[in-house]
Amino acid sequence: MSIYLYNTLTRHKEEFKPADAKNVRMYVCGPTVYDRPHLGNARSVVVYDVLYRLLRHVYGENHVNYVRNITDVDDKINAAAKANGEPISALTKRVEGWFHDDIAALNCLPPTNEPHATAHIAEMIAIIEKLIAGGHAYESAGHVLFRVESYKDYGRLSGRKLEELIAGSRVEVESYKENPGDFVLWKPSDAGDDPSSVFPSPWGAGRPGWHIECSAMSCKYLGDDFDIHGGGADLMFPHHENEIAQSRCSAPHSHFAKTWVHNGFLTVNGEKMSKSLGNFTTVKNVLDQGIRGEVIRFALLSSHYRSPLDWNEKLIHDAKKTLDGWYRVIKRYYDILNNQSFDNSELDNSEFRAALYDDLNLPLAISSMHIIATSANKIIDNQVAATSLFKLGKFLGLFSLTPDEWFKGNHVIYADTVNFIVNAPEFTAEVSVTNPKIDELVAERLEAKKSKNWARADEIRKMLSSQGIILEDRPDGTTDWRRE
Ligand code: AMP
Ligand code: ZN
């Protein structure tokens, strides 16, 4: 059985055939580290995390090379550091740390390689030199620009014609450009620029354009030809179009990335969530409200990755409700489940597997999990269904907590799959009642019930309920509890 992926380049869903099944290569554009990631950025990271997990499942954990860069030199970074009145290196280091913390809280696996743009300036310069030598780039007014007319396939990925782009003024029109569509490969520094954003080059001190960064880092870690290139749909033009032009012109024998994958937007009231529109919520904002990373992750996976997904209260509420139900199912068998090891070959539900192999159809995969959970609930002893649900959930990066942590935890964020555990004080939401105190009150209520002191029993239930603690009386006379 093969994976099928929708390829933006051909506009078709295609059977995915890596050039080398022992070394499947994927590059995804990573964050520009000038501000904390918002939920739209997180959607992109989470989607490619599932694709990475699927590739590892099919080709083996050690046979997938997933590169996601850190853009740590960029105009936006210079502007933000200036506005904050801090050195660029302090800003980029801090924001990169935030990025890692926030996506770890969403249970994302670290990529195989995470190169920094600032560590690959020499590679960028080498590509620019090749482009100039081949007539694809030229120096003008201290800049080096890519000559778009020198690449006949320019616009193929985005389906845009150069003339239309220029007519629609979608490109910056500067006097030093031969053609308004030409884009920057290297730009000169301004006097007073922070020295950590100034690099020597054959064209004077300056910094690279954004697009050349990804061409250089993908080529260095994956070679001229690789299997998958991903990013959000907003990157299709001009970023990815320009990456293709640069990479193919500097290595004419290559096809660059074969399959181009683009995730749809996370929206707010139908509008793309973005920094510039100001309609964004950071991942940290949501975590700070006491919403678990796993709930955010599941919410972000709940629609098809290519479709828009609107962020709202209902989405979070539904994600939490589903996960509550699933955790309840696995809770019954948790001791058994947790002691089993699930090797990479087990994805034993054929509907789930078929859905994921079919262009990562997550809504369908998730609906097969709902069916399994329903069947687990119908039969009192349904360990088989619970095991299946547990495995599939683990595969999707869920069930990182024990049921006790899920239902009774203090909303501390845990991350089981990555190198860093996020349990810094800043991630711990205020907790008004401690667990031992709740246990004590629950025991007192049971005693009150035994001695027919219904008023006190009721009072305790109400008191706990006002703190978001839900009591669940069992037929055997015991009481369990959970946080809302
Ligand atoms: P940026 O740091 O703005 O370059 O974005 C990092 C990644 O997040 C890119 O792959 C973007 O395409 C993606 N992205 C940004 N905003 C959204 C959004 N609202 N929905 C989905 N992906 C987004
Ligand atoms: Zn990129």
Image: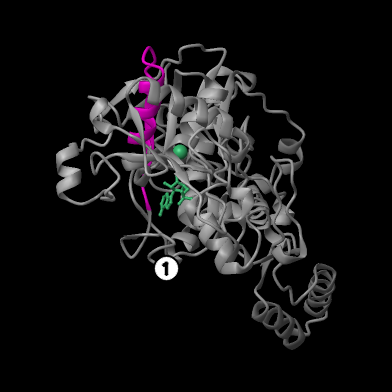
In the rendering, at what x and y percent does residue 433 appear?
A: 77, 75
Colour mapping used in the image: one colour
Q: What residue range appears in magenta?
A: 240-265
**Whether residue 294 is visible:** yes
Q: Is residue 220 left or right of residue 4?
A: right
Residue displayed at 64% across by 45% down: 399
Quarter in which the C terminus is drawn: bottom right
Mark 1 residue crowding within 10 angstroms, few (<14) / some (14–19) / many (20+) = few
Residue displayed at 67% across by 67% down: 483
* Residue type of the residue flagged with mark 1: Gly
**Magenta highlight on residue 241:** yes
**Magenta highlight on residue 208:** no
Q: Nearer the viewer, residue 251 or 46?
A: 251
Looking at the rendered structure, the secondary structure element under dot 1 is loop
Q: Nearer the viewer, residue 129 or 409?
A: 129
In the rendering, at what x and y percent does residue 127 appear?
A: 47, 26
Quarter in which the N terminus is drawn: top left
* In the image, the residue with mark 1 has its CB under 8 Å from the nearest atom of ligand 1: no
Res 150 quadrant in image:
top left
Residue displayed at 73% across by 88% down: 455
Does residue 329 sit above or below 314 in this rendering?
A: above
In the rendering, at what x and y percent does residue 292 appear?
A: 62, 58
**Residue at the limit of the structure toward the bottom, as seen here:** 455
Q: Is residue 146 left or right of residue 222?
A: left
In the rendering, at what x and y percent does residue 435 appear?
A: 80, 68
Does residue 360 sit above or below 45 in this rendering?
A: above
